[in-house]
C-alpha cells in the first residue's frame, strides 16, 4: 500500500535537490564574486609579490589542514547523511562531535611540525624571509581552517547546503573584503596584516558554524553507539584521496614558489582562481547530490542514483560553460583589471579554463565513487594524476614559469576526470556524460 512509482519518487527527490542546489549555487556565486573582489583589492593593495606571498600562505595552510582533517569531512558527510535519512538523531549528533573533536586535536598536534617545515623550507625563494614572518599567523588559522570543512560537510549531510556554502565561502570572503577596504583606506600595505585578517575570518566562520549547528540540531549532546574506529577506518582511506586532490590543486603554486618567484605565483594565482570559479557550480551541485549518492546507494536504488548522476552532470555543464567561454575568449581583458603585470597570465587562464570544461562536463565523479564504496579506485586515480602533475611542474616550471604550471595542471586535471569517468562507467554502469538520456531512470 505504501509503494510509489519510481518516477514519482525521483521527481520529488529532484525537486528537493533543485531547491538545495539553487541555494548552494547562489551562495557559491556570491562567494566567487567576493573572492574576485578580494583578489582585486589585494592586488592593488600589496602588488603581485605580496599577492604571491598571500597565495603561498593560503596554500600551505590548506595543505596542513587537509592532513589534519584525516578525511573526516567525507566521513562526516557519509555517516551523517545516512543517519539523517533514517532519522537517527543520536548518530547525527555523535558523528558530528567526534569528527570535529578529532579534527581539532589533530590540527593542534600538527601545528609544531608545520611551523618547523614552513620556516626551514625555502618557500618564496628570494622572498623567503618575508614568508617566514607570516608563518605564526598561519598557525593561528590552522585549527579553524581544519575544522570548518568538517562542520560544513555536516550541514550538507542534513540538507542545508546553502548554510554550508555561506559559512565556508561567503562569510570568510566577506570579512576579507571588509578588511581589505579598511586597510586600503588607512594606507596599510602589509601582507602580514592581510594574513591576520585571514586567520580572524576563519576563526569567526568556525565559531558561527558551531552556533548554527547548535540551533538546528535539537540536542547536540545526544549519544549513540558509534565507534570512532569505524569512522577512522572509513575516513583515513579517503584522506589519501583528499590529500592527493590537494596535491593536484596546489602543486603548481608550491613549485612556482620554490623554483620561480613570488611575482610568478601572484600572476598564476589570479589566473588559477579565475578558472576555478567555474568549478563553483560543480561544488554547489555536489553539496546537494553527494549525500543523496550515499543514501541512494545504501538503499539499493541504482536507477535513481544513475539518473541523479547524469542530470547533475548536465546541469553543471550547462551553467558553467558560458563563464568558461568568457575566460577563453577574453583572458587578457579580465586579467588586465588587476594591472598590466597580470596580463602575462593570459595563456595560463585559457589552458586552465579548458581543463575546467573537462572537469565540469564529467560531473561529480569523485563524490560518486567515494559515496558508493570505490574510494580506493579513486585514490589510485589520484595517485597517477598527482604524480603526473608533480612531474610536469618540475619539468616545465623552470623553463616556462607560470605557463608551465598551467600546462601541467590542465593535463593532469583532464586525465584525472577522464579516468574517473571510465571507472564509473565500468564499475557502476553509470555514464555521467550521457546527456541524451536524461529523462530515463532505468
Image (cartoon, grey):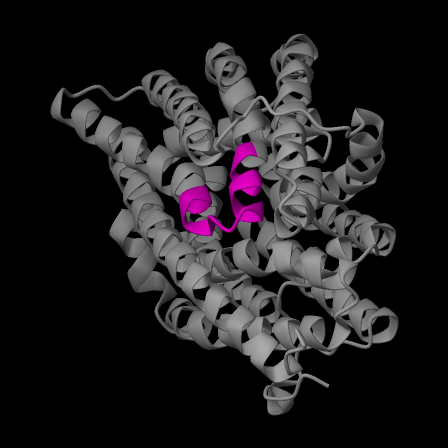
Residue 32 lies, in percent from the top left, at 37, 51
Residue drawn at the location 58% of the way across and 47% of the way down? 157
Residue 241 lies, in percent from the top left, at 76, 45
- Nearest the viewer among 55 and 238 is 238
The N terminus sits in image quarter:
bottom right
Residue drawn at the location 44% of the way across and 52% of the way down? 271
In the figure, is residue 11 to the left or right of 188? right
Magenta: main secondary structure: helix
- Nearest the viewer among 326 and 155 is 155
Res. 329 in view: yes
Instruction: Spot the residue most to the front.
Output: 1
In the figure, is residue 196 to the left or right of 420? left
* Badge count: 0
Residue drawn at the location 67% of the way across and 31% of the way down? 95
- Nearest the viewer among 216 and 384 is 216
| Residue 236 vertical placement versus 430 (above, below) | above
In the figure, is residue 195 to the left or right of 419? left
Q: Which residues are magenta?
A: 151-165
Residue 139 lies, in percent from the top left, at 54, 14
Instruction: Spot the residue most to the bottom.
Output: 436
Res. 251 in view: no
The C terminus sits in image quarter:
bottom right
| Residue 118 vertical placement versus 323 (above, below) | above
Residue 432 lies, in percent from the top left, at 68, 76
Report which quarter residue 149 is drawn in: top right
Report which quarter residue 212 is drawn in: top left
| Residue 85 vertical placement versus 77 (above, below) | below
In the figure, is residue 433 to the left or right of 319? right
Q: Is residue 385 magenta?
A: no
Q: Is residue 161 magenta?
A: yes
Amino acid at each position: 500500500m505504501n509503494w510509489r512509482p519510481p518516477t514519482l519518487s525521483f521527481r520529488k527527490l529532484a525537486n528537493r535537490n533543485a531547491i538545495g542546489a539553487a541555494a548552494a549555487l547562489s551562495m557559491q556565486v556570491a562567494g566567487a564574486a567576493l573572492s574576485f573582489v578580494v583578489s582585486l583589492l589585494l592586488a592593488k593593495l600589496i602588488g603581485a609579490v605580496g599577492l604571491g606571498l598571500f597565495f603561498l600562505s593560503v596554500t600551505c595552510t590548506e595543505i596542513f589542514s587537509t592532513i589534519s582533517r584525516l578525511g573526516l569531512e567525507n566521513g562526516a558527510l557519509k555517516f551523517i547523511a545516512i543517519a539523517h535519512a533514517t532519522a537517527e538523531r543520536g548518530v547525527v549528533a555523535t558523528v558530528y562531535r567526534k569528527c570535529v573533536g578529532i579534527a581539532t586535536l589533530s590540527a593542534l598536534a600538527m601545528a609544531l611540525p608545520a611551523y618547523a617545515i614552513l620556516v626551514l623550507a625555502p618557500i618564496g625563494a628570494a622572498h623567503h624571509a618575508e614568508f617566514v614572518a607570516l608563518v605564526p599567523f598561519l598557525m593561528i588559522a590552522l585549527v579553524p581552517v581544519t575544522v570548518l570543512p568538517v562542520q560544513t560537510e555536516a550541514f550538507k549531510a542534513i540538507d542545508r547546503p546553502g548554510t554550508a556554502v555561506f559559512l565556508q565561502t561567503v562569510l570568510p570572503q566577506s570579512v576579507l573584503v571588509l578588511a581589505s577596504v579598511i586597510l586600503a583606506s588607512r594606507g596599510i600595505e602589509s601582507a602580514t596584516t592581510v594574513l591576520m585578517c585571514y586567520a580572524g575570518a576563519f576563526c569567526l566562520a568556525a565559531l558561527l558554524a558551531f552556533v548554527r549547528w547548535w540551533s538546528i540540531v535539537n540536542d547536540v549532546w545526544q549519544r549513540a553507539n558509534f565507534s570512532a574506529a569505524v569512522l577512522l577506518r572509513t575516513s583515513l582511506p579517503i584522506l589519501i584521496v583528499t590529500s592527493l586532490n590537494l596535491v593536484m590543486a596546489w602543486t603548481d603554486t608550491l613549485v612556482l614558489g620554490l623554483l620561480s618567484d613570488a611575482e610568478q605565483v601572484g600572476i598564476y594565482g589570479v589566473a588559477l582562481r579565475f578558472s576555478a570559479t567555474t568549478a563553483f557550480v560543480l561544488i554547489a551541485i555536489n553539496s546537494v547530490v553527494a549525500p543523496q549518492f550515499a543514501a541512494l546507494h545504501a538503499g539499493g536504488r541504482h536507477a535513481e542514483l544513475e539518473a541523479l548522476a547524469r542530470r547533475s552532470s548536465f546541469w553543471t555543464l550547462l551553467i558553467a560553460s558560458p563563464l568558461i567561454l568568457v575566460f577563453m575568449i577574453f583572458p587578457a581583458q579580465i586579467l588586465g583589471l588587476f594591472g598590466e603585470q597580470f596580463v602575462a597570465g593570459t595563456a595560463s587562464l585559457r589552458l586552465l579554463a579548458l581543463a575546467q570544461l573537462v572537469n565540469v562536463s564529467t560531473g561529480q565523479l569523485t563524490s560518486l565513487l567515494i559515496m558508493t564504496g570505490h574510494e580506493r579506485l579513486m585514490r589510485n586515480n589520484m595517485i597517477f594524476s598527482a604524480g603526473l602533475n608533480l612531474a610536469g611542474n618540475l619539468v616545465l616550471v623552470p623553463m616556462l614559469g607560470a605557463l608551465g604550471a598551467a600546462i601541467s595542471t590542465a593535463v593532469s586535471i583532464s586525465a584525472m576526470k577522464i579516468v574517473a569517468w571510465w571507472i564509473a562507467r565500468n564499475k557502476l554502469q553509470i555514464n555521467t556524460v550521457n546527456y541524451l538520456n536524461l529523462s530515463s531512470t532505468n
